[in-house]
Image (cartoon, helix red, strand yellow):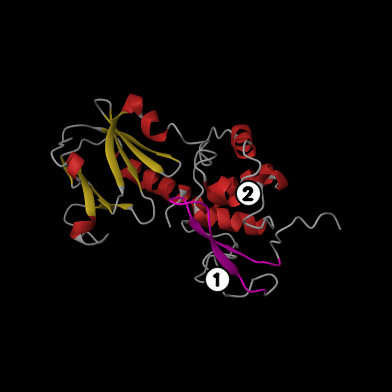
């Protein structure tokens, strides 16, 4: 599932392959860009901003995309078979002399002036994977709505950017937080710090792991484990939808390890 770490890794691969290279051909397969031709421009850099991917080109143009649930960019050498999905799922093709980047199932794909990137990413809170991550601002953003559930607050990209459903679910488990606990009853700094540590650790793993065990079926504590026993206490994992449409998401938790109320000191 694409989250901040997924986009960061994609940006790194794309930047290594395309950075500094001239585009020999472009093919956009979305109605708003169908007649756009960016051939001849140089790919200056590819950067991540939360879950957004920004391809900055010469001439002050940026290709902006967002993966949402199942979008992706794939890289192929000339003549290599494309394996990212059916042809009707392709939204963009960017060719250089050495590489072809193919964007599959991209629900968001548009062009913006590079000096106007804030029109598409300016609403985002501090990026958890940015070298200059503003921890104090992220904490302040979360604490600004003390009655909001911690699950909704962590998932809101306006508070801090990069967390998706996997990370917010696993962070809540690891901190013993029921998904409906209000922010006012949570150690917000601990939630921010753990979120950043997990995302940064998974940059090296290449997979999304919260248990420390990178094997199939053992990577998560509660995420996508509804009806299965908790790895800690064997209580059956619960699941329910949380949030308001269109931001409603499924949540997983252990009723014993993540009690509804703060148990307080022993």
In this rendered view, identify the residue nearer to me: 217 or 69: 69
The quadrant in which the C terminus is found is bottom right
Residue drawn at x 24%, y 32% as measured from the top left: 42
Q: Is residue 259 left or right of residue 109?
A: right
The quadrant in which the N terminus is found is bottom left
Residue drawn at x 32%, y 28% as measured from the top left: 114
Residue 6 among those drawn in magenta: no
Secondary element at image label 1 = loop
In x, y percent, where is residue 98?
Answer: 21, 45
Q: Which of marks 1 and 2 precedes in the sequence? A: 2
Q: Nearer the viewer, mark 2 or mark 1?
A: 1
Q: Are marks 2 and 1 in contact (CB under 8 Å)?
A: no
In this rendered view, identify the residue nearer to me: 160 or 81: 160
**On screen, residue 265 above or below 136:** below
The label on residue 123 is: none
Residue drawn at x 18%, y 52% as measured from the top left: 78
**On screen, residue 58 above or below 87:** above
Magenta part of the chain: 235-256
- Furthest-left residue in this view: 35
Is residue 157 among the parts visible in the rendering? yes
The label on residue 226 is: 1
Q: Is residue 82 left or right of residue 162?
A: left
Q: Is residue 203 left or right of residue 83?
A: right
In x, y percent, where is residue 223?
Answer: 54, 64
Secondary element at image label 2 = helix
Residue 241 among those drawn in magenta: yes
Q: Which residue is mark 2?
A: 194
In x, y percent, where is residue 245?
Answer: 45, 52
Please rate how many residues cluster around mark 1, counting C-alpha atoms within 10 Å: few if below 14, some from 14 to 19, many from 20.
some
């Amino acid at each position: 599932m694409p989250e901040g770490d997924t986009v960061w890794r994609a940006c790194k691969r794309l930047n290594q392959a395309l950075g500094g290279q001239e585009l020999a051909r472009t093919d956009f397969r979305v109605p708003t860009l169908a007649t756009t031709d960016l051939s001849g421009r140089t790919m200056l850099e590819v950067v991540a901003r939360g879950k957004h991917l920004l391809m900055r080109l010469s001439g002050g143009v940026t290709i902006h995309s967002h993966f949402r649930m199942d979008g992706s960019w794939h890289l192929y050498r000339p003549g290599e078979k494309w394996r990212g999905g059916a042809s009707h799922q392709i939204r963009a093709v960017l060719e250089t002399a050495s590489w072809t980047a193919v964007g599959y199932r991209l629900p968001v794909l548009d062009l913006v002036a590079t000096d106007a990137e804030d029109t598409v990413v300016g609403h985002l809170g501090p990026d958890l994977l940015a070298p200059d991550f503003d921890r104090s601002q992220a904490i302040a953003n979360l604490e600004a709505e003390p009655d909001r559930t911690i699950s909704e607050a962590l998932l809101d990209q306006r508070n801090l950017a990069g967390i998706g459903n996997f990370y917010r679910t696993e962070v809540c488990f690891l901190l013993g937080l029921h998904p409906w606990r209000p922010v006012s009853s949570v150690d917000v700094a601990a939630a921010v710090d753990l979120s950043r540590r997990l995302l940064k650790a998974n940059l090296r793993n290449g997979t999304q792991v919260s248990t420390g065990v990178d094997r199939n079926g053992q990577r998560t504590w509660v995420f996508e484990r509804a009806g299965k026993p908790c790895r800690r206490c064997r209580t059956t994992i619960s699941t329910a939808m949380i949030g308001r449409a269109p931001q409603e998401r499924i949540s997983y938790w252990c009723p014993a390890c993540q009690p509804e109320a703060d148990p307080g000191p022993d």
